[in-house]
Amino acid sequence: MEISNFIYVRPELLNMMRRFTNQKKLVRPAKTRFTTACITLSSIHHQKNNLRKMFTSDKWEDSKWSKEQQERRVVQTILLARFWTTIVFALKVSGPLVRVLRLVDGEKKPPMGYIYEAMDRAKEAIANSFNNNEEKYKDIFTIIDRRWELQLHRPLHAAGYYLNPSFYYSNLSIQEDDEIVNGLYSCITKMVASLDVQDKILAQLSKYKRAEALFGQPLAIRQRDKISPVEWWDNFGQSTPNLQKFAMRILDLTCSAFGCKRNWSVFEQLHSKKRNRLAQSRLNDLMFIKYNISLKRRYNLRDIVDPISLRDIDDSNEWLIGRLDDDSEEDELVFDDDTLTWGNVSRAAGAKEPTFYSRARASGATNVSCSSSSTTQPTPKQINLDDSDQEEEDTDGYKSNEGVNEDEDQFSDDEFDL
């Protein structure tokens, strides 16, 4: 992203930004490229007012960077209301998907029995964020469905959804869904070689459907939503041994976000070009500390964090109430006790003007070469919103001032709470 690159490649400007944002970061490495982009957008959105104030402050005007050509594009972007509404739109779409991605990479419980439901709820959350106005999100759903159907969706997801007692008994219409049932039968056919065992599984499946035998015990009913599906089948599936073995085999499978993975390992961070001058002893100490802090954090969260939590997906995205109206953004006050708005600042700074202009022909000019020159006005250069490989500059005293409750916790790599 051009804004973050512009700031992070200039250490003194980066320090200025940290003073205005109270030592908050804009770029935050994550496990995947997609999540890194979302976290960065989230950070920029949270620091909207601070970034606006920085680029309109006296310190900025007195700095050497305010005279650069690239600075003009960045300042115009920061002050442009449509830029912020575009970020809100991107976060509305990406927020639920990031949480599904966190579910896929969850470590405490195998997520195979939850992926199908998580995708449905993510799409519901996106639709709700646009007040169910299909015109605003139908193109997004087309992209999601195409990716899901062609590359991500597998019969294992449908079978895991069917065999998850928490979802099945709360929505018996699952057994009438052709896609889900076909996925279940496809898994039985492919994963069980013996035809005799296949027939036994189908026969035992009727007990699961009607909640007979141990499945209907009060204890089993209470535990449907309290323990993992694998544990539930292990505890209450003895009356259907073949189905029990098959269900546990399906539900114990793990998933991965390897398709969009970016390896932000500690080793790679410490061996980057900007840190390769570290002494070997110092490098070893950093590796030891970072790994042990990570292990301790994961250990402390082992009985607190449940990565398979789907109950809050519909309202988990704080940008669901974000505004997409440029006029609303422009009407925001710069100071609470004044009438000056950011729209006034934007117009005064020329944020709505094109970044580049063509050379106009002077009226009545006698110079033939000038009159024959092209007067086509180039299209203003757009800000590149693609994620970048630019690594964050680590200046002295930066990480030591970071708080533990930053907004990055919304997308924490150590937990997944929908």
Image (cartoon, helix red, strand yellow):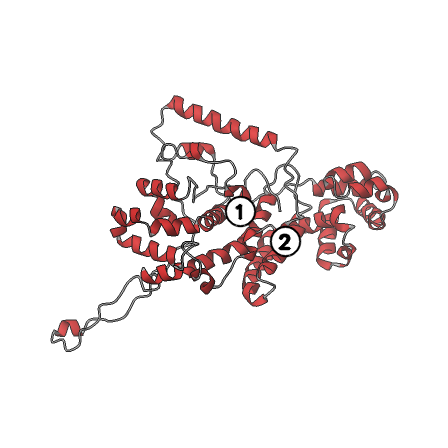
For disc 1, the neighbor class at 10 Å (few under 14, some 14 to 19, many from 20) is few
What amino acid is found at the position of numbered circle 2 in the picture?
Asp
Q: Residue at x 31, y 40 (%)?
A: 12
Is disc 1 placed on a helix, strand or loop? helix
Mark found first going from the N terminus, 1 or 2: 1
Quarter of the view holding residue 345 = bottom left
Closest to the camera, between mark 1 and mark 2, is: 2
- In the rendered structure, the answer to whether residue 329 lies left or right of residue 93 reads left
For disc 2, the neighbor class at 10 Å (few under 14, some 14 to 19, many from 20) is some
Judge whether 225 appears above or below 362 on screen: above
The answer to whether one can see residue 256 in this image is: yes
Q: Residue at x 80, y 42 (%)?
A: 222
Residue 149's spot in the image, x, y percent?
61, 57
Which residue is tagged 2? 314
Of 257 and 31, nearer the camera is: 31
Q: Residue at x 51, y 60 (%)?
A: 323
Residue 341's spot in the image, x, y percent?
40, 59
Furthest residue in direction top, as rendered:
281
Is disc 2 placed on a helix, strand or loop? helix
Furthest residue in direction left, as rendered:
366
Residue 261's spot in the image, x, y percent?
51, 44
Furthest residue in direction bottom, as rendered:
364
What amino acid is found at the position of numbered circle 1 in the picture?
Gly
The answer to whether one can see residue 1 in this image is: no
Of 251 and 341, nearer the camera is: 341
Which residue is tagged 1? 259
Of 10 and 262, nearer the camera is: 10
Gap between marks 1 and 2, in whole Å?
A: 26 Å
Furthest residue in direction right, as rendered:
213
